[in-house]
Amino acid sequence: MRRGFSLIEVLIAAALLGMMGVILMTSLTSSLDVTDKATAISSRHHLIRQALARMSSELSMAYMSANRNPVHLVVDTQLRGDKNQISFVAFGGLSHRQDAQESGEREITYFIQEGNLMRREKANPGNRLWKEGKAKLVCPDVDKLELKYWNVLTSAWDSVWKTEGQPIQTVTLPIRVRIEISAKLNDEDIEKITTETQIWLDKPVRIVP
């Protein structure tokens, strides 16, 4: 005579299956959370490095023009570098509008505003630098932007570099700029990334029309 399962055995089997299901779901949910966090951190790393690459590229094209009329100044080209902000004039501007009356130079400023890395740009530099232009977001959730400027005369990093008010015969741009960004990866972790860029035209250039 065959004997079936008792009610207690059926209940025990159902409880074991339920426990296995809970363990499986917990493991699956934990794996998905880890994947989401890893993806988010990877995306943040990519965004921060993109911001650094853009700053480095534009700073490398900074320049000062030797074609300056101090009596009737039409176009000014300077660099104003502080510890947490930098403004400069650079080549390499691209217009996204057809028949735009814009040159290849830009006034550019990078700065921190309300915990975000911002960039302000104005086409066609004039004689009153960094007074106009619309600020746009480059990288959100940036705690700190720190800049340093290599001084070849002292072989040391300076925290400030300003060319305004200096004779055109002696003024120079820093040949290297160190950029450090401290940005949030998530609610707990802060990443600090540092890079250096070289300014190729460190001395004023004479542009022949």
Image (cartoon, helix red, strand yellow):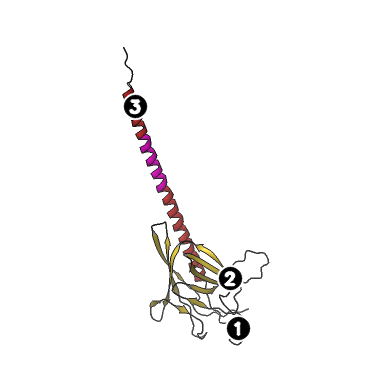
Which amino acid is tagged 2? Gly
Disc 1 designates what residue? 73
Q: Are marks 2 and 1 in contact (CB under 8 Å)?
A: no
Above/below status of 17 relative to 116: above
Q: Residue at x 51, y 63 (%)?
A: 138
**Residues under labels 1 and 3: Cα distance?**
92 Å
**As displayed, is residue 166 above or below residue 18?**
below
The C terminus appears in which quarter of the rendering?
A: bottom right
Highlighted range, magenta: 20-34
Left or right of 127? Residue 151 is: left
Q: Please state the horizontal and vertical placement of residue 58, each as a whole percent of the image.
A: 52, 69
Outermost residue, top direction? 1
Numbered tag placed on residue 133 in the rendering = 2
Task: Name which residue type carries label 1.
Answer: Leu
Residue under numbered circle 3: 11
Nearest to viewer (mark 3 / mark 2): 3
Residue shown at 58%/70% (left/top)?
133
Q: Residue 65 at x, y = what percent?
A: 56, 79
* Labels 2 and 1: the sequence-earlier one: 1
Say what secondary structure mark 2 lies in: loop
